[in-house]
Image (tube, grey):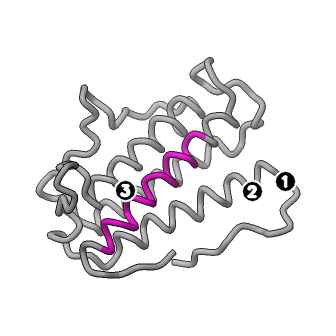
């Protein structure tokens, strides 16, 4: 997978926002790729028993599904958030790095529908602009990539961007 920084002399804000989200998405995948299932499912921070690399990737998939696809683009897809507290962090026995990376990538394809909308348009939820939703998902993804940085280093010592 090729991960490149967005264009340094960018002049189109919308394109730049999507390029940064793509960069963050690929960074998240790289933080999980190569871990064993046990490493990726391990809760390595004692005060956060649901904070696992797999749980984070599963949560980011649910974030994209809801915000970009359902609330943003109005796609008729089932929400991956079903319950309170948020169950998207919960792991199933068949959740593996490969299966959750694949699910996350599939969600990126669904989110392409939002790219077709004007950033200043009101999103499908009728409460926000498309621009707000994209910014929200980018900040959420960036925050969780930081968590993945720590989890990867704790799991196998690997560091990097």
Per the model, the C-alpha gap separating discs 3 and 1 is: 29 Å
Q: Nearer the viewer, mark 3 or mark 1?
A: 1
Q: Is residue 71 left or right of residue 29?
A: right
| Picture quadrant where residue 11 is located | bottom right
Per the model, the C-alpha gap separating discs 3 and 2 is: 24 Å
Per the model, the C-alpha gap separating discs 2 and 1 is: 6 Å
The single residue placed furthest to the left in the displayed view is: 93
Residue that numbered label 2 is attached to: 16
Q: Nearer the viewer, mark 3 or mark 2?
A: 2
**In the rendering, at what x and y percent does residue 32 appear?**
34, 69
In primary-sequence order, the first of circles 3 and 2 is 2
Q: Residue at x 19, y 71 (%)?
A: 39
- Magenta stretch holds residue 145: yes
Residue that numbered label 3 is attached to: 103
Above or below for 152 versus 41? below
Q: What's drawn in magenta, residue-wise?
A: 136-153
Residue that numbered label 1 is attached to: 12
Q: Is residue 64 left or right of residue 88?
A: right
Q: Are marks 2 and 1 in contact (CB under 8 Å)?
A: yes
């Amino acid at each position: 997978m090729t991960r490149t920084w967005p264009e340094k002399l960018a002049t189109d804000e919308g394109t730049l926002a999507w390029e940064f989200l793509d960069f963050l998405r690929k960074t998240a995948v790289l933080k999980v790729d190569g871990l064993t299932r046990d490493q990726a499912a391990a809760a390595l921070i004692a005060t956060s028993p649901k904070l696992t690399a797999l749980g984070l990737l599963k949560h980011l998939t649910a974030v994209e599904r809801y915000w970009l696809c359902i609330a943003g683009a109005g796609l008729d897809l089932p929400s991956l958030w079903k319950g309170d507290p948020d169950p998207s962090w919960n792991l199933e026995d068949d959740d593996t790095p490969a299966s959750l990376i694949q699910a996350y990538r599939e969600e990126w394809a669904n989110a392409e529908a939002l790219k077709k909308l004007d950033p200043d348009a009101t999103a499908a939820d009728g409460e926000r602009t498309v621009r707000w939703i994209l910014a929200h998902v980018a900040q959420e993804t960036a925050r969780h990539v930081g968590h993945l940085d720590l989890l990867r280093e704790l799991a196998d010592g690997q560091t990097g961007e």
